């Protein structure tokens, strides 16, 4: 059981470090008031292929790592009871 605790703790630390780095590297996606007034169109080329860009991949990996962070955190809370 100690081996599982050590492995999960290591994975948790690795996920948290990579998640911190990914969040710090991402650019801000705030369009401001102009997008509210003008409206944003989802039919342009960039919006349709957003997942293929560097920013899209970073966002996808951030979501995946955030979910993994929560799952491993729950597993650690089950293994380490209070």
Image (spheres, rainbow, N blue to C red):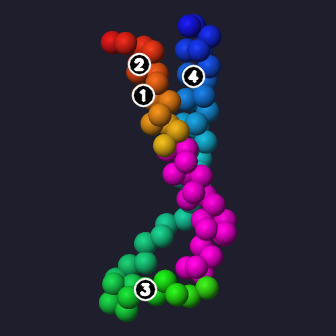
Residue 57, magenta (yes or no): yes
In terms of secondary structure, where does tag 2 sit? helix
Of the numbered discs 1 and 3, the one sitting upstream in the chain is: 3
Mark 4 against mark 2, which lies toward the viewer?
2
Residue 39 image position (x, y, % from top left): 38, 88
User: Mark on residue 78?
Assistant: 2
Q: Are marks 1 and 4 in contact (CB under 8 Å)?
A: no
Distance between mark 4 and mark 2 Cα atoms = 12 Å
| Label 1 close to label 2 by CB (< 8 Å) | yes
Label 4 crowd bin: few (<14), some (14–19), many (20+), radius 10 Å: some
**Dominant secondary structure (helix, strand or loop) of the stretch shown in magenta:** helix
Would you say 63 lies left or right of 80 here?
right
Viewer-proximal residue, 1 or 35? 1
Task: Choose the circle earlier in sequence order: 1 or 4.
Answer: 4
**In terms of sequence position, does the residue under pointer 4 or pointer 3 come before the other?**
4
Q: What residue lies at 61% left-to-right and 24% top-to-bottom?
A: 10
Position above or below: 32 against 22: below
The residue identified by callout 1 is 74
- Which range of residues does the magenta coloring cover? 46-66
User: Who comes first in sequence, dot 4 or dot 2?
Assistant: 4
Instruction: Examine the image and state in which quarter residue 1 appears.
Output: top right
Toward the bottom, the furthest residue is: 38
Q: Quadrant of the C terminus?
A: top left
Q: CA distance from mark 1 to mark 2?
A: 6 Å
Q: Secondary structure at mark 1?
A: helix
For the point 43% across and 85% down, which residue is it?
A: 40
Instruction: Give left or right: position of 23 versus 53.
Output: left
Q: Is residue 45 above or below residue 7?
A: below
- Outermost residue toward the top in this view: 2
- Residue neighbourhood size for the residue with mark 3, other residues' Cα within 10 Å, grouped as few (<14), some (14–19), many (≥20): few
Residue position marked by numbered label 4 in the rendering: 8
């Amino acid at each position: 059981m100690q081996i599982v605790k050590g492995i999960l703790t290591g994975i948790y630390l690795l996920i948290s470090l990579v998640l911190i780095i990914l969040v710090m590297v991402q650019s801000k996606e705030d369009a401001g008031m102009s997008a509210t007034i003008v409206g944003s169109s989802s039919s342009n080329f960039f919006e349709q292929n957003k997942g293929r860009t560097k920013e899209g991949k970073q966002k996808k990996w951030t979501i995946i790592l955030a979910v993994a962070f929560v799952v491993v955190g729950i597993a650690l809370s089950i293994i380490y009871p209070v």
